[in-house]
Image: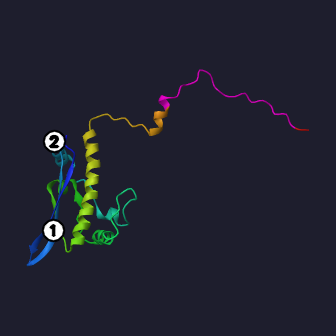
């Protein structure tokens, strides 16, 4: 199975006599996985702007200093598209008003792609048994259960009179 990739195309397009920055994102996944995603999970949200209206979780890569205000503005704008499994697999295009808005959408698309990769990992596991064990469980491989309780005898401590 080939690993998923995000194809990003950027360019300037003449719209109503003006050059406007445009960006297209397209997720490339294994053909068998793509078919399953399109048939069963096309409407799954990968990026919903309302979910990030108060910022991104700490575990998510944060936008750079110069990009951060543009990402925030894009998230507040009605122009910010929601990204679903279907739209990212078919290719999503944004005609931006500035290069910064284009960069902000690229950042958003990358976070949606991160979600798609995580989602794909779960879809691949459908119909399979998986086992979860926390890292602490590895300690048990080196421990042995004692035959008898190992508790030191508690003796009465003489009190000073």
- Please tell me whether residue 40 is drawn above or below residue 107 in the rendered image: above
Residue 100 inside the magenta-drawn segment: no
Residue 14 percent across, percent down from the top left: 9, 74
Nearer-the-camera pick, 40 or 77: 77
Q: Which residues are magenta?
A: 140-159
| Type of secondary structure dominating the magenta stretch | loop
Q: CA distance from mark 1 to mark 2?
A: 30 Å
Q: Residue 51 — which label?
A: none
Q: Nearer the viewer, mark 1 or mark 2?
A: 1
Left or right of 25 on screen, residue 131: right
Question: Which residue corresponds to the image point at 29% horizontal and 48% vertical from the top-left?
Answer: 118
Judging by the rendered image, the residue that carries numbered circle 2 is 32
> What kind of element bears circle 1?
strand
Q: Check the picture and name the quadrant holding the N terminus.
A: top left
Residue 61 percent across, percent down from the top left: 34, 59
In the figure, residue 48 lies in which quadrant?
Answer: bottom left
- Please tell me whether residue 149 is drawn above or below residue 23 in the rendered image: above
Question: Which residue corresponds to the image point at 24% horizontal and 67% vertical from the top-left?
Answer: 103
Judging by the rendered image, the residue that carries numbered circle 1 is 22
């Amino acid at each position: 199975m080939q690993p998923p990739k995000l194809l990003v195309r950027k360019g300037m397009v003449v719209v109503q006599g003006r050059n406007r920055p445009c960006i297209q994102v397209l997720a490339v996944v294994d053909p068998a996985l793509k078919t399953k995603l399109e048939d069963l999970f096309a409407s799954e949200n990968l990026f919903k702007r309302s979910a990030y209206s108060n910022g991104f979780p700490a575990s998510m890569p944060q936008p750079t200093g110069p990009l951060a205000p543009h990402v925030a503005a894009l998230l507040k704008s009605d122009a910010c598209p929601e990204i679903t499994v279907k739209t990212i697999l078919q290719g999503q295009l944004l005609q931006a008003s500035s290069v910064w808005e284009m960069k902000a959408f690229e950042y958003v698309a990358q976070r949606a792609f991160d979600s798609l990769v995580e989602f794909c990992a779960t879809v691949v596991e459908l119909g399979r048994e998986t086992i979860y064990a926390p890292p602490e469980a590895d300690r048990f491989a080196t421990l042995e259960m004692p035959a008898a309780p190992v508790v030191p005898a508690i003796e009465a401590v003489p009190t000073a009179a």
